[in-house]
Image (cartoon, grey):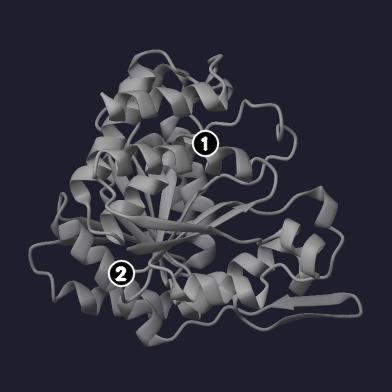
C-alpha cells in the first residue's frame, strides 16, 4: 500500500485537493491506483493558526514517511505581516529541503480548445510542448539573508553538485522527448551563472545525442513568448525558474492549468499545482482544479510508477475540456466541482 501525505493548505487549496482526491478514488475503483492510504496534515497558514509554525514536525515526519506528497497551496494576506521564518512560504521551502526534492518539473502543453483563450496570439501556440526543470533547493531562496538598518541582503550560492544533478535530470528527460535542452542563466553578470554554464556544458558531453543551447534569462523571457514552440526542455536555477515557469503558464491560458512535480534522488516526490492560494476566490467554488488533478497524474507516473493510469487522467482532463467543462479563469462557467465530476465520469467510463 502506498502512503500519500495530503496537505490541503490555504485558500483554494482544500477545494482543489478535494477534487484530486475524488479522482484518486475513481482510478482506485478501476484498479488503476492500487491501494493507497491518504493521510491529511496541516501546512502553511492553517498550520500557523493551529501550531504556530508553517511546517509542524509531525507534518514533515509524515511527508518523509510517505511515498508521495500532494499539496494544495499555501499563504494569504492573513499571514503576510509575519516574520520570514514564520510565513507560510517558509514551510514550503522547508518541506522541499526536508524531502530533498531538488528538481521541479513544470510541463506546458496548451489544450487546443483553450488556445483562443490564452493571452498569446494563437499562431504562436501551435506545437508548444515544453518542460521547465527548475532547481529547487539552492540559490537565493536558500542563501543567507537579513536586514541591517537600511540595508537588506539575500545571497545566491550554488555548488557544482547542485547544478550537476538538476542539469543531468533535464538531459535525461530531453533524451525521451525532442532531444533539446535550453539552459538559462545570467552568465554575463553573475558568478553563480558562470558556474552553472560551465557545468551544463560539461554535462552535455555525457549526452551526445541531445543539443544544448545557452540563453540569458532576459532574452529567454522574451523568446518564451515570441517563439515558445522552439523550446523542449528548459533547465535553470531556482529564482529564474520560479519566474519563467509562471510566465510559461500563460501559454496554457491560465496558471490554474499547470501541474508540477518536485523530485529528488528516489521515487518520492512533492506534487502541486503551480498556482497560489488565491484567497480572493476561496470558498466561491470557481477555482480551477485541473492543475491539481494533473499533478495527481504526475504523482502516479513518477512516484507510484503507474504511467497508464497517469495517461488516463490526462486524457480525462482533455476530454472534459473538449466537452465544455471550462472554469472561470479560462472564461468558462463550470464550477470546481463540475470540472472534477467531469474528469471522474470519464475515468469511470
Provide the secondary structure element on which disc 1 rests: helix
Residue 324 is situated, as x and y percent measured from the top left of the image, at 41, 13
Task: Name the residue located 78 percent from the left edge and 80 percent from the top edge.
Answer: 146
Task: Name the residue located 43 percent from the left edge and 86 percent from the top edge.
Answer: 159
Residue 227 is situated, as x and y percent measured from the top left of the image, at 34, 37
Name the quadrant containing residue 321.
top left
Where the N terminus falls, by quadrant?
A: bottom left
Taking depth in this image into account, of 101 and 228 the one nearest to the observer is 101
Taking depth in this image into account, of 54 and 208 the one nearest to the observer is 54
Badge 2 density bin: few <14, some 14–19, many ≥20, Cα 10 Å: some
From what the image shows, is residue 272 above or below residue 25?
below
Horizontal side of 216 relative to 138 (left or right) equals left
Task: Read off the residue under disc 2.
Answer: 267
Task: Read off the residue under disc 1.
Answer: 256
Where the C terminus falls, by quadrant?
A: top left
Distance between the alpha carbons at the discs numbered 2 and 1? 26 Å
Provide the secondary structure element on which disc 2 rests: loop
Amino acid at each position: 500500500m502506498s502512503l500519500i501525505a495530503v496537505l490541503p493548505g490555504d485558500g483554494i487549496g482544500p477545494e482543489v485537493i478535494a477534487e484530486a482526491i475524488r479522482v484518486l478514488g475513481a482510478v482506485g475503483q478501476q484498479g488503476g491506483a492500487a491501494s493507497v492510504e491518504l493521510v491529511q496534515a496541516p501546512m502553511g497558514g492553517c498550520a500557523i493558526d493551529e501550531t504556530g509554525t508553517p511546517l509542524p514536525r509531525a507534518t514533515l515526519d509524515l511527508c518523509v514517511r510517505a511515498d508521495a506528497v500532494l499539496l494544495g497551496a499555501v499563504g494569504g494576506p492573513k499571514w503576510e505581516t509575519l516574520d520570514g521564518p514564520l510565513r507560510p512560504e517558509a514551510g514550503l521551502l522547508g518541506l522541499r529541503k526536508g524531502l530533498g526534492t531538488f528538481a521541479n518539473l513544470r510541463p506546458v502543453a496548451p489544450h487546443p480548445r483553450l488556445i483562443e483563450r490564452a493571452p498569446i496570439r494563437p499562431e504562436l501556440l501551435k506545437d508548444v510542448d515544453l518542460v521547465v526543470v527548475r532547481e529547487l533547493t539552492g540559490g537565493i531562496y536558500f542563501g543567507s539573508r537579513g536586514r541591517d538598518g537600511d540595508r537588506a541582503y539575500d545571497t545566491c550560492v550554488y555548488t557544482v553538485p547542485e547544478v550537476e544533478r538538476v542539469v543531468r535530470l533535464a538531459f535525461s528527460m530531453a533524451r525521451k522527448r525532442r532531444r533539446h535542452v535550453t539552459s538559462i542563466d545570467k552568465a554575463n553578470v553573475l558568478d553563480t551563472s558562470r558556474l552553472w554554464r560551465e557545468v551544463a556544458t560539461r554535462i552535455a558531453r555525457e549526452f551526445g545525442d541531445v543539443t544544448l543551447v545557452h540563453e540569458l534569462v532576459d532574452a529567454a523571457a522574451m523568446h518564451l513568448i515570441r517563439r515558445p514552440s522552439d523550446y523542449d526542455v528548459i533547465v535553470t536555477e531556482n529564482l529564474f525558474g520560479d519566474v519563467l515557469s509562471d510566465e510559461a503558464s500563460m501559454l496554457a491560458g491560465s496558471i490554474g492549468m499547470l501541474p508540477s512535480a518536485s523530485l529528488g534522488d528516489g521515487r518520492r516526490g512533492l506534487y502541486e499545482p503551480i498556482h497560489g492560494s488565491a484567497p480572493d476566490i476561496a470558498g466561491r467554488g470557481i477555482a480551477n482544479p485541473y492543475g491539481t488533478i494533473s499533478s495527481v497524474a504526475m504523482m502516479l507516473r513518477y512516484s507510484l510508477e503507474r504511467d497508464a493510469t497517469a495517461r488516463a487522467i490526462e486524457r480525462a482532463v482533455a476530454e472534459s475540456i473538449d466537452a465544455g467543462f471550462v472554469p472561470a479563469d479560462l472564461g468558462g462557467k463550470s464550477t470546481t466541482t463540475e470540472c472534477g465530476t467531469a474528469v471522474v465520469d470519464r475515468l469511470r467510463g
